[in-house]
Image (spheres, rainbow, N blue to C red):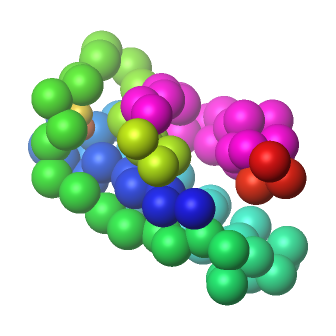
Amino acid sequence: MELTICVGESCHLKGAEIVVKTFQTLIKKENLGDKINLKGSFCMGQCTPNEVTVQIDKTFYKTRYQESEAFFYNTLFPLLKN
Ligand code: FES
């Protein structure tokens, strides 16, 4: 899985670095290093007022940094099992 987190200016201001750190921690905790390729990206043209843009393979998602752990388990995790 290609997991790309936007670290452009707008997403940076909404906590993109916290999302990156949360995902890094959870990938390690769940032993998913060989299944997920985590990357950063400049603005993906998807800026929103309160959320960070996350791309999983070709699909864009949004998460608030406060909800990044829930996003990981509720949205990303089920996609891995497909
Ligand atoms: S800065 Fe992240 S989508 Fe624009």
Q: Image point 75% across, 76% down: which residue?
A: 32
The percent coordinates of residue 9 (x first, y second) are: 14, 43
Q: How many dots with numbers?
A: 0
Magenta span main SS = helix
Q: Image point 57% across, 62% down: which residue?
A: 1
Viewer-side residue, 4 vs 23: 4
The percent coordinates of residue 74 (x first, y second) are: 81, 35
Viewer-side residue, 70 vs 4: 4
- Rendered position, 6 above or below 66: below
Can the viewer see residue 77? no
Split into quadrants, the picture shows ligand 1 in the one at top left
Q: Is 13 left, or right, of 74 in this rendering? A: left
Q: Is 11 left, or right, of 60 in this rendering? A: left
Q: Image point 48% across, 27% down: which residue?
A: 62
- Rendered position, 65 above or below 18: above
Residue 47: quarter of image: top left
The percent coordinates of residue 7 (x first, y second) are: 26, 53
